[in-house]
Amino acid sequence: MQHNVPEYNSRVIGNRSLPPIVFLHGFLGSGKDWLPCATALATHFSCVLPDLPGHGLTATVPDGPDAFENTVADLAVMIEHLPFQQVHLVGYSMGGRLATALMLSRPELFKSTTIISSSPGLQDKTSRIKRAESDDRLAGRIRRDFTGFLSDWYRMALFAPLTAHPDFPAIFETRKKNNPALLSSALHHLSTGRQPSYWEKLPQNRIPMMFCAGEKDTKYVEIGRQMVNLCPYSHLEIFPDCGHTLQLENRRLFLQRLLNFLNMQENHVS
């Protein structure tokens, strides 16, 4: 069955003839979140920064029970239309869940995958149902009181290092520009509670994978340990004094480790 190229807003930073990296942002974000990283990497790579469904300038959100899988399929089609046979993939949080699914379902498209503060989903049905119900309550709050939702969202402990960062006020103002109805729909349809669990597929992985977690984000440090124990060709990088948004909290160290990892894969391929 033919799958049309999705109408995702996207920007490319760097020379399009250079090896591509596709960056997938987290919930509430947009492709612009990756601009500082992309600018720093643009002399070595072509950086592709899509806005995921319901975020930034992408006004479409897949619906129905297979919305997550359809989003993965859309992203795969977008990647297939890039002028390279394989790309590097980087995904943060929600984008990391999509990146994990892409890595395991379409491995032929990727040279490497970097997963940041994310998971392969929830393993048992009861947990998925509870999470879907919780996300639906949050989706309703987004529609009713978006600014109040944002304030409460960033009071969560995992964002404490981010809220202390000097860039946070500007980030918060940027988040307020999102469309609440689209975000609500994205949270409902792309909920961790509605996606498949990919835990059981991790042992099948054949793509070099780096999992990144902030030292203070203990939940995802443990998830990362479990993932790399199950996943061949993978390793864990822990970032000192960082929380959930390590790529912003210590961008210099993140870029250093990412560039080292990407160069290893480029040299191996060549």
Image (cartoon, grey):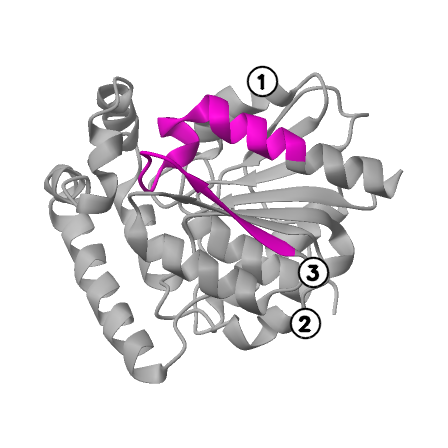
Identity of the residue drawn at 20% across and 26% down: 164
Q: Secondary structure at mark 2?
A: helix
Looking at the image, which is closer to me, 69 or 213? Answer: 213
User: Which amino acid, mark 3?
Assistant: His
Q: Are marks 1 and 2 in contact (CB under 8 Å)?
A: no
Against 207, residue 24 (above or below) is: above
Instruction: Name the residue beneath numbered marker 2.
Output: 204
Q: Residues within 10 Å of mark 2 (few under 14, many from 20)?
A: few
Regarding residue 62, the answer to whether it shows in the image is: no
Residue corresponding to mark 1:
40
- Splitting the image into 4 quarters, where does residue 13 fall? top right
Q: Nearer the viewer, residue 121 or 59?
A: 121
Which residue is drawn at the image coordinates 69% and 60% (left, top)?
3
Within-10-Å neighbours for mark 3: few <14, some 14–19, many 20+: few
Furthest residue toward right: 270
Q: CA distance from mark 1 to mark 3?
A: 34 Å
Q: Is residue 94 above or below residue 134?
A: above
Labels 2, 3: front one: 2
Of residue 42 and residue 79, the one placed in the foreground of this image is: 42
Magenta stretch: includes residue 16: no
Element on which disc 1 rests: helix
Residue 90 falls left or right of residue 122: right
- Residue 209 relative to residue 240: left or right: right
Instruction: Answer whether residue 80 is visible to the viewer in this image.
Output: yes
Give the image location of residue 244, x and y in percent: 33, 42
Residue sitting at x 74%, y 63% = 2
Q: Earlier in the sequence, mark 2 or mark 3?
A: 3
| Residue 217 vertical placement versus 50 (above, below) | below
What range of the chain is rendered magenta?
Answer: 234-260
Is 250 part of what is drawn in magenta? Answer: yes
What residue is shown at x 41% (from left), y 61% (from top)?
223
Give the labeled residue for mark 3: 3
